[in-house]
């Protein structure tokens, strides 16, 4: 058996899109990383054994070991009183009240330790553990279940998670289109074009360009017009001509764009 090293830590690609980091205590992230590492084909054993091999049994990111107490904030971090003026203790109490009510309503025990949370991960299907007389083998599903599929949530949280998933889905598509508009066309205020033309110029699929345009319009960064009237970007035919009107001031004020090319990847 090969034991991974700390530099081999693996994270499930679906973690951010699923939105569990907005629901679970902060240790949910490193725990998922630990389980993802345990799920590699060349590892068998317990999470305790993996933690011992990786960090000699103590990992600060997870709060120590699997017996560590769960928290929603980092105990040693400087508190942001602008974001949460009520202070750490009141914020922590409120987060636990909300989290506890959500789990209790769904019939799940409220975890207190990282080990408790690891068992909930198994119950929820975020992870699988196959026990044998000699060891344990871990695995994770290709797509993580969504919090809303397992837990009752408030409308505001559901809306926020939907928005995050949409942004993660559309972000790379928007970046590819913006790279063409900026690098190739020099940030034009408006252009007369079509989905087919933009797709060819940006090396994208026409459906992906349609999604990117819909995101730009929804965010207030652009307008799509036909015959001088607003048009629905999601209903454009690939060949239809339309006028794309960009609001670059709004775009630059509200977005952070990272462009990585060539050998920088």
Image: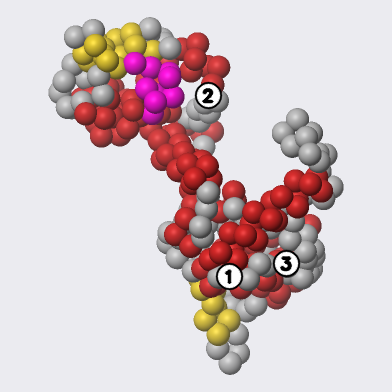
Cα distance between the residues tagged 2 and 1 = 39 Å
Give the side of residue 23 with respect to residue 247, left or right.
right
**Magenta region: which residues?**
215-223
251 sits left or right of 177 in the view: right
- Give the number of the mark in front: 2 or 3: 3
Is residue 71 highlighted in magenta?
Answer: no
What residue sits right under mark 2 in the picture? 255
User: Which of the two discs, 2 and 1, labels the residue nearer the N terminus?
Assistant: 1
Q: Given contact means CB atoms under 8 Å apart, are the residues at marks 2 and 1 in contact? A: no
* Image depth: mark 2 or mark 1 in front: 1
> Looking at this view, is 60 or 151 the one in front?
151
Image spot of residue 25 (x, y percent): 67, 56
- Specify which label sits upstream in the sequence, 2 or 3: 3
Q: 163 or 155, which lies in front?
A: 155
Q: Residues within 10 Å of mark 3 (few under 14, many from 20)?
A: some
Please give left or right for residue 221 compared with residue 230 in the image: right
């Amino acid at each position: 058996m090969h034991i991974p090293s700390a530099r081999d830590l693996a994270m499930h690609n679906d973690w951010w899109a699923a939105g569990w980091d907005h629901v679970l205590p902060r240790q949910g992230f490193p725990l998922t990383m630990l389980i993802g590492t345990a799920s590699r084909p060349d590892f068998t054993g317990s999470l305790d054994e993996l933690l011992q091999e990786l960090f000699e049994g103590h990992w600060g990111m997870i709060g120590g070991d699997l017996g560590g107490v769960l928290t929603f904030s980092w105990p040693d971090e400087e508190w942001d009183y602008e974001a949460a003026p009520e202070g750490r203790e009141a914020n922590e109490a409120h987060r636990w009240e909300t989290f506890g009510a959500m789990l209790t309503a769904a019939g799940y025990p409220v975890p207190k330790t990282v080990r408790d949370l690891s068992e909930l991960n198994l119950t929820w299907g975020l992870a699988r553990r196959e026990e044998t007389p000699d060891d344990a083998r871990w695995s994770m599903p290709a797509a993580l279940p969504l919090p809303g599929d397992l837990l009752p949530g408030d409308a505001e949280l559901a809306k926020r998670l939907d928005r995050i998933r949409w942004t993660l889905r559309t972000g790379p598509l928007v970046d590819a289109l913006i790279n063409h508009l900026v690098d190739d066309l020099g940030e034009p205020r408006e252009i007369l074009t079509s989905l087919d033309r933009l797709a060819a110029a940006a090396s994208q699929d026409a459906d992906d360009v349609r999604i990117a345009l819909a995101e730009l319009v929804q965010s207030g960064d652009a307008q799509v017009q036909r015959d001088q009237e607003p048009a629905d970007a999601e209903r454009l035919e690939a060949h239809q001509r339309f006028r794309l009107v960009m609001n670059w001031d709004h775009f630059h004020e509200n977005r952070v764009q990272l462009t990585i090319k060539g050998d920088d990847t």
